[in-house]
Each structure stands twice: as structure tokens, then as C-alpha cells.
């Protein structure tokens, strides 16, 4: 049902990246790497499309760096040291915490972290005359699991057409390190935060429900009959965040 052809996907995505850069007149790409599967898989695809000297890596961490998981990969690929930025966003976050009294509101704080990262990524893109690569997958997109004008902001999205479970399948084909594939998915917004604990359901179940609802156009009642106990919770999660998919509402002149 959700199986992909990894060699075909790799070829399609690499061609997509090359075409976007050529069409927009850029040679360089900035990518934020958390050390998770989505950003690492995206990096593996980007390195197939452009030379290492044209890739700028930004590890923008909060609280504790995960760069130890990223360093061996960038070293193996040959990313120049001057193209790698390991930056703590703690000082920036602290300013907002103090000025807006955010300590008890994890969601607002998480949104600010995502937007701080966006500011840095786009500043690096300006510095290096580069496009910003997004790392969002299709599951996150449908669930609205992103911060508007934060981690959602990008110039192109290499893996947004793939569900999370499909990203895992592609990651294995791309030979990503085992420790990265086996990491618990997290947006890195606060200590101990994980995607699935926030959802209240797994990516595996979500992907199947999302596939039936968006791809096969089944109703919620029909999906329930198949036997997904969290189907209503998953679709409601999507509907609650559906406003995130729309550009600002404006008055159209007739």
C-alpha cells in the first residue's frame, strides 16, 4: 500500500533538486540538520545532486548538541569545515522567554525556536547565495505538524511527497547510519519531547489512515470499518491544523 521503489525515488528526487537549482539560478543549498532521519535523508539526496563544497550545513540546537551524530556523515562526504555551522539557539530563546514570560508555555516556546532557526537558515542562505532545503515529510504536512513561517519555511522540499514510513524505507536504501534510523522522532523543541507522544498515535498508524483519507478518498466511517482505532483522532488532528496550509486570506478583486 505505502511501498515505494527506492531507486526510482532517489533518481526522481535528485533530478528534482538539480532542476530547481538550475531553474532558479543557484548552485548552493543550505540545510538545517538536526541529526534526525528526515534531515539526514534529505542531505543524502542533496549530496547526490550537487558537490560537497556547495552544501552548507546548519545544526541549530537547543539545550544539547547532536552534532556528534552529524559530524561523521559530513566528514565522509567532504563538506568543507567553513560550510558547517553548529549554533546554540539558547541565547536567542532566553531573550524571548524573559521578555514574553514563556517558561510555562511549551507550544509558544517551540514555535519561537522553529522561527529562530528559520531566521538563521535564511541568513546563511543570503550569505552563501543559496536556496534553503526543507526537510518536511508528507505525514507532518497533512497533520500540520510544523510551525508556520518556522520549520515549514523553505525554498524546496525534497521529501514532502513521502510519508514518514516511506522516508524510513528510502533511508535504509540510502544507507543512513543505523543510529539515525533508529532514533526516536523529535522536533527538538524541549527536553524529552517526541513527535508520537504529542500525537497520541504512531506514525505507522497515521500514515495508513492519511493514505486512505487523502489518497484513496475514503470517508472517516469507511476508514473506521477497516479497524483503525485512532482514525478519528488522526483526522481531527489534520482538520484542526488545516488552516496552516493556506496562504494569508485576502480580498480578490472581481
Image (tube, rainbow, N blue to C red):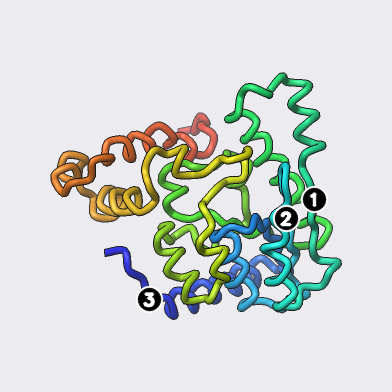
Asked if the residue at tag 2 contacts the one at tag 1, i.e. Cβ–Cβ closer than 8 Å, the answer is: yes
> Element under label 1?
strand
Relative horizontal placement of residue 226, taking residue 40 as reference (left or right): left
2 or 229, which is in the foreground?
Answer: 229
**Residue 27 appears in view:** no
Label disc, if present, on residue 87 of the rendered structure:
1
Relative horizontal placement of residue 126, taking residue 70 as reference (left or right): right
Gap between marks 2 and 3, in whole Å?
30 Å
Q: Residue at x 79, y 36 (%)?
A: 92
Asked if the residue at tag 3 contacts the one at tag 2, i.e. Cβ–Cβ closer than 8 Å, the answer is: no
Look at mark 2 in the image and give the residue it sits on.
59
From the image, which quarter does the N terminus lie in?
bottom left
Q: Residue at x 27, y 36 (%)?
A: 232
Asked if the residue at tag 3 contacts the one at tag 1, i.e. Cβ–Cβ closer than 8 Å, the answer is: no
Q: Quadrant of residue 128?
A: bottom right
Q: Residue at x 44, y 80 (%)?
A: 7
Gap between marks 1 and 2, in whole Å?
6 Å
Q: Earlier in the sequence, mark 1 or mark 2?
A: 2
Look at mark 3 in the image and give the residue it sits on.
5
Residue 227: % across, % down: 18, 46
**Residue 132 appears in view:** yes
From the image, which quarter does the C terminus lie in?
top left
Relative horizontal placement of residue 232, taking residue 163 as reference (left or right): left
Residue 6: % across, % down: 42, 76
Q: Badge 2, how many Cα within 10 Å: few under 14, some, many 20+? A: many
Relative horizontal placement of residue 206, taking residue 223 as reference (left or right): right
Q: Badge 1, how many Cα within 10 Å: few under 14, some, many 20+? A: some
Amino acid at each position: 500500500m505505502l511501498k515505494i521503489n527506492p531507486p526510482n525515488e532517489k533518481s526522481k528526487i535528485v533530478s528534482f533538486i538539480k532542476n530547481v537549482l538550475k531553474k532558479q539560478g543557484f548552485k548552493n543549498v543550505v540545510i538545517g540538520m538536526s541529526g534526525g532521519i528526515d534531515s539526514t535523508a534529505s542531505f543524502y539526496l542533496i549530496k547526490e545532486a550537487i558537490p560537497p563544497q556547495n552544501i552548507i550545513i546548519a545544526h541549530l540546537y537547543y539545550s544539547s548538541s547532536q552534532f556528534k551524530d552529524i559530524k561523521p556523515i559530513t566528514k565522509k562526504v567532504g563538506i568543507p569545515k567553513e560550510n558547517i555551522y553548529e549554533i546554540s539557539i539558547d541565547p536567542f530563546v532566553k531573550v524571548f522567554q524573559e521578555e514574553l514570560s514563556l517558561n510555562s508555555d511549551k507550544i509558544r516556546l517551540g514555535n519561537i525556536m522553529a522561527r529562530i532557526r528559520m531566521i538563521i537558515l535564511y541568513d546563511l542562505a543570503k550569505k552563501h547565495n543559496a536556496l534553503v532545503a526543507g526537510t518536511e515529510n508528507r505525514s507532518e504536512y497533512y497533520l500540520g505538524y510544523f510551525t508556520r513561517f518556522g520549520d515549514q519555511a523553505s525554498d524546496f522540499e525534497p521529501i514532502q511527497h513521502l510519508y514518514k514510513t516511506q522516508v524510513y524505507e528510502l533511508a535504509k536504501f540510502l544507507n543512513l547510519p543505523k543510529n539515525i534510523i533508529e532514533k526516536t522522532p523529535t522536533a527538538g523543541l524541549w527536553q524529552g519531547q517526541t513527535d508520537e507522544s504529542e500525537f497520541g498515535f504512531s506514525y505507522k498508524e497515521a500514515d495508513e489512515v492519511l493514505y486512505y483519507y487523502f489518497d484513496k478518498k475514503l470517508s472517516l466511517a469507511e476508514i473506521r470499518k477497516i479497524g483503525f482505532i485512532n482514525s478519528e483522532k488522526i483526522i481531527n488532528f489534520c482538520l484542526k491544523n488545516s488552516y496552516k496550509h493556506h496562504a494569508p486570506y485576502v480580498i480578490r478583486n472581481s
